[in-house]
Image (cartoon, helix red, strand yellow):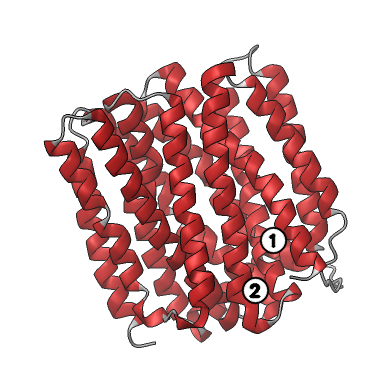
């Protein structure tokens, strides 16, 4: 818990809180205005594309530039983008304006995450990397917990404007705080053009994963498939079921998103406590636990006519899914950090994050269409997610057991 790590944690709390509110309310605003689940899924899918691209490029930038300066610039730039959106969104067409704003925000997020992750090995000792990652994940989870709850209340009572203003303030405060962080940085001396640098650095990352650590490719495939069938289902399915099937309020939906955030917090705490006791060879149990959590959701939607019972069970199972998924995510990030030399950790982490996210736009668009067509019987879509995730869980068992 040195000064630099503490400042990164505080900066993350403020910045991710603003980000969490925006990620909750902007898509919800679109769903409420248009009443279209398929459009909601497609817009979410389009928004994810720059996240994928910048997740690949972001690590290259993080390894070449001062990580502190990257974080400061991105927070200031995010505040500027939201300020512009606040001014113009009432005067132009909603959907294009919202898509462009989300594209920029997700692109910024794709650059920010590998920058923070690649900073951890530089400011904490090697034996504390997993605990450091757990704390960073805990901060992310706290933001995911508080942002939707507060965002749901503000949106339900006052509309979108107060949320935009709060987000701008959060990003400005975070950027100012990050100015005081010191992260070890050795300036590279190179004369190549930017495109050549990116091509060479990405090639170096791919060669490392293919030739030296081929297990990383299999890990990317597992995470990608899990994102396709599980993560995408949560992103599109929960708001679709709550708002269109159960006809719940924005406040209740926000509370459930907060419960999912608590699940991430709990998963981060458990991972930090267990630390070295967690074995990568048995990580498939975590995926299996997340998968089994879908089953009670299916049962309650089939047999229960009570909206409150459905709401409670889906919320609790969402908590369970996020707990297992968070533990698995921290394990994978730590595994990559330990197995990767420091000088290329940002590149490799960004490749892992970027490639594993490639399936998300496909999944979100797919689930948007599926829930649009089966919104009166959403348990059919959940069965598809359950069976697919079971197959992925057993595939991961055979991938990791011989490490």
The residue lying toward the viewer, choosing from 108 and 141, is 141
Marks 1 and 2: CB-CB under 8 Å? Answer: no
Q: Is residue 36 above or below residue 171?
A: above
For the point 57% across and 39% down, the residue is 147
Asked whether, in this view, residue 69 is left or right of residue 21, the answer is: right
- 281 on left or right of 214: left
Mark 2 Cα within 10 Å, few/some/many (few <14, many 20+)? many
Q: Quadrant of residue 133?
A: bottom right
Q: Quadrant of the N terminus?
A: bottom right
Asked whether the viewer can see residue 134, the reply is yes
Front residue of 131/164: it is 131
Query: Could you tell me how far apart the alpha carbons at marks 1 and 2 are, in whole angstroms?
Result: 10 Å
Identify the residue position indicated by label 2 in the image: 345
Q: Is 336 on the left-hand or right-hand side of 358?
A: right
- Residue at 37%, 82% in the rendered image: 281
Q: Which residue is mark 1?
A: 115
What residue is drawn where x is 51% and y is 68%?
A: 330
The relative height of residue 63 versus residue 224 in the rendered view (above or below) is: below
x and y percentages locating residue 191 in the rendered image: 85, 68
In primary-sequence order, the first of circles 1 and 2 is 1
Secondary element type, mark 2: helix
Front residue of 264 and 376: 264
Task: Residue 304: name its quadrant.
Answer: top left
Residue sitting at 40 percent across and 35 percent down?
A: 41
How many labels were placed on the picture? 2
Alpha-carbon neighbours of circle 1 within 10 Å: few (<14), some, or many (≥20)? many
User: Which mark is drawn over residue 192?
Assistant: none
Q: Quadrant of the C terminus?
A: bottom left
Q: Position of residue 127 (x, y in %)?
A: 63, 83
Q: Position of residue 385 (x, y in %)?
A: 25, 50
In the image, taking residue 292 as reference, residue 274 lies left or right, namely right
């Amino acid at each position: 818990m040195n000064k630099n790590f503490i400042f990164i944690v505080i900066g993350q709390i403020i910045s991710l809180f603003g980000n969490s509110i925006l990620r909750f309310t902007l898509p919800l605003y679109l769903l409420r205005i248009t009443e279209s689940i398929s459009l909601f899924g497609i817009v979410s899918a389009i928004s994810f594309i720059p996240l994928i691209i910048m997740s690949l490029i972001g690590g290259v930038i993080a390894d070449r530039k001062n990580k502190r300066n990257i974080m400061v610039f991105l927070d200031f730039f995010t505040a500027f983008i939201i300020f512009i959106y606040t001014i113009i969104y009432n005067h132009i067409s909603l959907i294009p304006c919202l898509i462009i704003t989300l594209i920029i925000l997700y692109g910024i997020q794709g650059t920010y995450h590998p920058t923070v992750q690649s900073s951890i090995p530089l400011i904490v000792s090697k034996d504390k990397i997993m605990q450091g990652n757990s704390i960073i994940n805990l901060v992310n989870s706290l933001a995911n917990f508080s942002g939707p709850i507060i965002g749901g209340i503000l949106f339900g009572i006052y509309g979108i404007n107060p949320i935009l203003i709060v987000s701008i303030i959060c990003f400005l405060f975070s950027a100012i705080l990050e100015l005081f962080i010191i992260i070890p940085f050795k300036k590279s001396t190179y004369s190549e053009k930017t495109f050549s640098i990116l091509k060479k650095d990405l090639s170096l990352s791919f060669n490392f994963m293919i030739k030296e650590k081929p297990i990383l490719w299999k890990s990317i495939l597992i995470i990608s498939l899990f994102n396709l069938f599980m993560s995408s289902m949560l992103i599109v399915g929960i708001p679709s079921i709550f708002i269109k099937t159960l006809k719940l309020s924005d406040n209740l939906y926000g509370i459930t998103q907060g419960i999912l955030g608590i699940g991430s917090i709990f998963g981060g705490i458990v991972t930090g406590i267990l630390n070295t006791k967690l074995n990568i060879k048995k990580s498939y149990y975590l995926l299996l636990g997340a998968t089994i959590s879908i089953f009670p959701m299916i049962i309650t939607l089939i047999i229960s006519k009570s909206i409150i019972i459905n709401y409670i069970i889906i919320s609790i199972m969402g908590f369970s899914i996020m707990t297992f998924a968070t533990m698995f995510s921290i394990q994978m990030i730590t595994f990559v950090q330990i197995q990767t030399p420091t000088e290329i950790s940002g590149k490799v982490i960004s490749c892992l994050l970027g490639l594993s996210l490639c399936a998300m736009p496909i999944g979100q668009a797919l689930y948007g269409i599926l829930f649009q067509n089966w919104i009166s019987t959403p348990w059919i879509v959940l069965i598809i997610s359950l069976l697919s995730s079971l197959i992925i869980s057993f595939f991961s068992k055979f991938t990791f057991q011989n490490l």
